[in-house]
Amino acid sequence: MAAPLRDLSPFFAPRSIAVVGAGERPTSSGGAVMQMLRLAGYGGRVVPVNPRGGAIFGYEAVPSIKAIDPPVDLAVIVIRPDAIVEAVGEAADRGIRNLLILPGGFAEAGPAGVARNEALLKLAAARGLTIAGPNCAGIVHLDPAWRFAATFLRDLPPGTAPGTRNGLAFISQSGALAEEFIDKANARGLPLTSVVSVGNAVHLGVEDYLAWLGERPEIGAALLYVESIEDRERFCAVARKVAARKPVIALFGGRTEIGGRAAAAHTGAVANDEAAIDAFCASCDIVRVDSLRRLLIAAKAFGRFPQGLGRRALILSNSGGPGVICADRAALEGLALPPLPMPMAEVLRQRLPGEASVANPIDLLADAREDRFGMALEAAMTHAAADYDMVLMIHVVPFMVEAEPVIDRLAELAARAPMPLMHSMMGTLPGKADWFAKMERAGVPMFNDVEEMAEAAGLLARYPILREKVQSDILPTLFFRDKKHT
């Protein structure tokens, strides 16, 4: 029987917090947490705890946990490891039941750390505490209704606008990958809303965070980096429940012998081969990716189309070679490229130069301008909306054609397109930033190359199949080997 859903509101949307070890210096752990709370625009009560008292980032500090009055929803602890268990006891005495412990020095830190970890667990069990971490980089949850960040990661993700439901959550067993994901989300405009660094997971593991975030209306898809799983059956049950409504995409580390040894040293994982991980992901109805690059592509894709897309793709290109490469990658990703419907083909034959290719992929030829691009897309919108689940557009920019009018026309048509569009641009692109931004504002995900676009489309097409499977309640068969117990 599945364990009940934990209420993690105190960890993602606390109305009051204490920062134990708060400071003014942003390069210190306590100072970094205080600074990120401010940058996130956290609107709740903040109580810095520092023996020197005074004002810290504009908040009046108290000299000890005992002086916190009234108790807070969450205590964030950023002090030296040998003082943490005592601080947790003081928090329990003060009536604080939820703690986020960022420093390491516990089960991962030799015999002294193991003893400290056992003392922490014993204390938590006796006092009814819930602990996130230790040995983690913190939690960020930029729900537009209540923004929160308790972390010493160097930056915040972009988040989403109020009322949107396509926010991405990234749950990671690596703080460094959380940092990298935030950086790439900012660079690529991904709607990353929540970031969780799991750490040692004395109480809260990947599945706990996935279960809670999976229920959040502002989250449209969950992305995971996983090396080890404590309770495989619970993880699978949670993943399937979430996958019935929104996609779960996972990158599993330690899939080779060498990588497995590294994962064992990092998180205590037991090595698993490709077949075991594939079987486990299939049983959990997870969209599996095999690289960080693919995980970021999935974030781009599901950040725009959180419910996924069908398999039928139309490739619309102005260059033969990139169209061929896109078709190859699309086929390898499991997409179908149905032939053009007759009415659409007739329009194209009448209006395109004789040497153009009226097939799927369509080749408009290198000298295609906005009139040719616009005509072809309008023909697809008018005659092929029921025949394709997506249009993959390829725009190579030769020296003799101005790109901006093409972008203007495609962006205009995209606003009323009856099928999803994706677009890639290749070649020397002097106006790339502006062109990409204009298409993205029109709702069209932009890609740097055709293979990346086809990979995104393939990942999107996998989710509806998994969703249908899990909704039919097919019982999973588990193959994944457990994390070793220490």
Image (spheres, grey):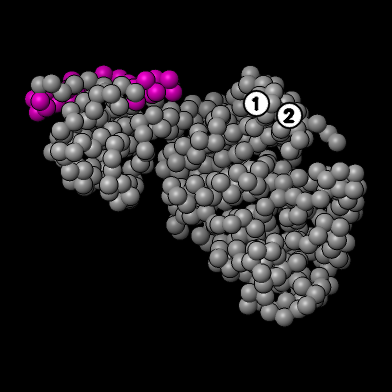
Q: Amino acid at mark 1?
A: Arg
User: Which residue is found at the position 52% from the left and 54% from the top?
Assistant: 157
Label 2 neighbour load within 10 Å: few <14, some 14-19, many 20+:
some
Which region is colored magenta? Answer: 326-353
Q: Is residue 442 visible?
A: no
Label 1 neighbour load within 10 Å: few <14, some 14-19, many 20+:
many
Judging depth in this view, the residue of 261 and 465 nearest the camera is 261
Image quadrant containing the C terminus: top right
Q: Position of residue 394 (x, y in %)?
A: 28, 33
User: Which residue is found at the position 39% from the left and 29% from the top?
Assistant: 451
Q: How many badges with numbers are in the image?
A: 2
Q: Position of residue 307 (x, y in %)?
A: 45, 37
Q: In this image, 399 relative to 236: left or right? A: left
**Magenta stretch: dominant secondary structure:** helix
Tag 1's secondary structure?
A: loop
* Mark 1 → mark 2, Cα distance in angstroms: 10 Å
User: Which residue is found at the position 63% from the left and 74% from the top?
Assistant: 57
Q: In this image, 20 relative to 422: left or right? A: right
**Nearer the viewer's eye, disc 1 or disc 2?**
2
Q: Is residue 338 within the magenta segment?
A: yes
Q: Is residue 251 above or below residue 189?
A: above
Q: Amino acid at mark 2?
A: Arg
Q: In this image, 145 relative to 46: left or right? A: left
Q: Position of residue 107 (x, y in %)?
A: 83, 44
Residue 74's tag is: none
Tag 2's secondary structure?
A: helix
Whether tag 1 and tag 2 are in contact, CB under 8 A, the answer is no
Tell me where residue 267 sits by quadrant.
Answer: top right
Q: Which residue is mark 1?
A: 255
Residue 261's tag is: 2
